[in-house]
Amino acid sequence: RAAGTYIRTDGPPGSVPQLDASDPSLPALLEAARTSQPVRFGYRKQTDPEPQRRTMEPWGVLSWRGRWYVAGFDRDRGEPRSFRLSRITGKVERFGTPGEFERPDKVDLLELVAGRQEDSYTARIRVTGSGAGALRRLAESEAGGELRIGFNDVEWLARRVASAGPSAQVLSPPELAAAVVSRLRAAAGQSA
């Protein structure tokens, strides 16, 4: 609440939402937002083959619908923006001095994130065994061992499919299958 974000209170008392904090850019962005220090990072949109360099004043980091975002002032665009952490490439570089900017008093970080317009896609994933529980929780439907999962970030879903190991096989779309294969090869130390 102190960060200006909506806190859900409709769950059972003492319940804690599941948050994946494994994104490598999360600690640096949290620290930059805490200390009001600008950052630079590479950012790849779904439609861009190469990452673009972004420079921003991070006002805060929040999780929305199971994904992490940084929201703040985009110095390159000259306006408030939000960026999904799973699309950040390489290291987040803090620069300048702590306290270099101030977050506006009446900014709604959740609105900056929730108001994003993004394309949505559906993945078809075959699952077997018990190793795909996290994918089953994401599924919009399941029939005959085949899940349908809505997504708008290939890398975000590829990370989850790859973590299921041999319990999951992407049937479509092909770009998701390629992203999973790439992640598994990288984990095995093989080149693409």
Image (cartoon, rainbow, N blue to C red):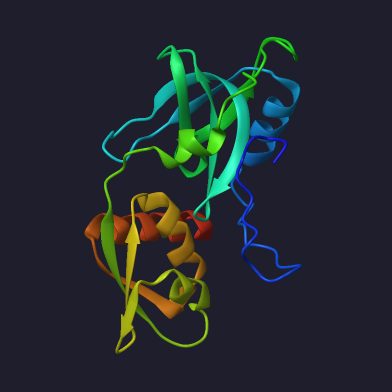
Give the quarter of the image for residue 175: bottom left
Q: Is residue 14 visible?
A: yes
Seen from the viewer's position, the closer of residues 179 and 154 is 154
Seen from the viewer's position, the closer of residues 126 and 114 is 114
User: Does 161 sit left or right of 16 as displayed?
Assistant: left
User: Does 180 sit left or right of 165 as displayed?
Assistant: left
Is residue 146 placed above or below 140 in the rendered structure?
below
Seen from the viewer's position, the closer of residues 53 and 64 is 64
Is residue 129 placed above or below 69 in the rendered structure?
below
**Rendering coords of residue 132 (x, y %):** 48, 77
Q: Residue at x 41, y 58 (%)?
A: 158
Is residue 133 placed above or below 37 in the rendered structure?
below
**Rendering coords of residue 110 (x, y %):** 53, 39
Q: Residue at x 43, y 66 (%)?
A: 161
Is residue 183 placed above or below 161 in the rendered structure?
above
Q: Residue at x 57, y 26 (%)?
A: 107
**Rendering coords of residue 6 (x, y %):** 60, 45
Q: Is residue 25 visible?
A: no
Q: Residue at x 70, y 64 (%)?
A: 16
Quadrant for the N terminus, please: top right
Seen from the viewer's position, the closer of residues 131 and 134 is 134
* Number of marks drawn: 0
**Rendering coords of residue 93 (x, y %):** 61, 23
